Image: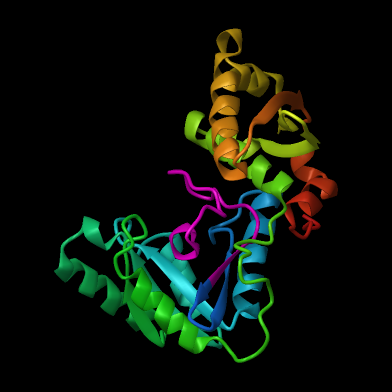
Amino acid sequence: MNQLVGTKVSIVSHKVQTTRMPVRGIAMEGDSQIVFIDTPGIFKPRRRLDTAMVTSAWGGARDADVIVFLLDVERGIKGDAEAILDKLDQEGGRKILLLNKIDTIPREKLFALATEANSRAKFDDTFMISALNGDGCQDFMKYLSEQVPEGPWFYPEDQVSDLPMRILAAEITREKLYLRLHQELPYASHVETESWKEQKNGIRVEQVIYVQRNSHKKILIGKNGQTLRAISSAARLELCEIMEQPVHLFVFVKVREKWIDDPERYREMGLDFPKS
């Protein structure tokens, strides 16, 4: 979505299930305004947060004018991708297959994947792109511009997202956390922006990273605070670039054992709180 919108509106990491909440990216193509909704991934839920994410993803698909199924060609059709295709075949509306990372595998394998995916779900069209270098993206955007229904634009022409900056800032810190830490710790943590103040010398931002155990807190802070400093420094640099002014970022770590069962955290993420 960042490639299609032309700027960063959704965080990215090499880990699965990085996206936790629906994120809207807004792009102009000719006279058309295209609103992308980057939903959480769809997978087999293991805990309450997983259930909320998957429910949000299917809800977003049903509300869309066009459903785009993005397939990582390096991973192919297996596991969660198989389950999604089987269920997607039962969904109504216009469905598009979008093969990504086409520069990483031979062409004959791309066509084999496209054929298999189309045999599992009835796609109206198939596109092949590389989100990294932009190959195929312009053709895809032109196609979408012709598919959106006629009507007034939902957002101003120069707006690229409806995500408040304080939430984007928390997401950027979470991205750096995902890039730095491993195993279950990124999934057991949550970042919130508690304070955002405009000052003469820049913006002062205070954030809290919630973790579930004291052992998680020790790992996150690291020896002599090195890990937390690295995460906050990387987040601060990116925020300075986005805001085009100095950002003074202060990040704290707190243990909240049951944050994952707190309805308020789900409201903060724009997710419905599952009963179980």
At a point 30% along the width and 59% down the height, the residue shown is 101
Q: Indicate whether 214 appears above or below 146.
A: above
Seen from the viewer's position, the closer of residues 112 and 68 is 68
In the image, which residues are magenta?
1-27
Magenta includes 205?
A: no
**Which quadrant of the structure image shows residue 196?**
top right
Relative placement, left or right, of 32 versus 20 is: left
**Which quadrant of the structure image shows residue 114?**
bottom left
Q: Position of residue 204 (x, y in %)?
A: 75, 31
Q: Position of residue 181 (x, y in %)?
A: 51, 29
Q: Position of residue 164 (x, y in %)?
A: 72, 53
At a point 47% along the width and 44% down the height, the residue shown is 13
Relative placement, left or right, of 249 versus 10 is: right
Seen from the viewer's position, the closer of residues 38 and 246 is 246
Considering the image in quadrants, where does the C terminus appear? bottom right
Q: Indicate whether 104 appears above or below 128.
A: above
At a point 71% along the width and 25% down the height, the residue shown is 250
Answer whether residue 55 is visible to the viewer in this image: yes
At a point 62% along the width and 18% down the height, the residue shown is 221
Seen from the viewer's position, the closer of residues 184 and 191 is 191
**Which quadrant of the structure image shows residue 198?**
top right
Magenta includes 2?
A: yes
Q: How is the image coloured?
A: rainbow
Q: Position of residue 150 (x, y in %)?
A: 61, 92
Marker count (numbered): 0
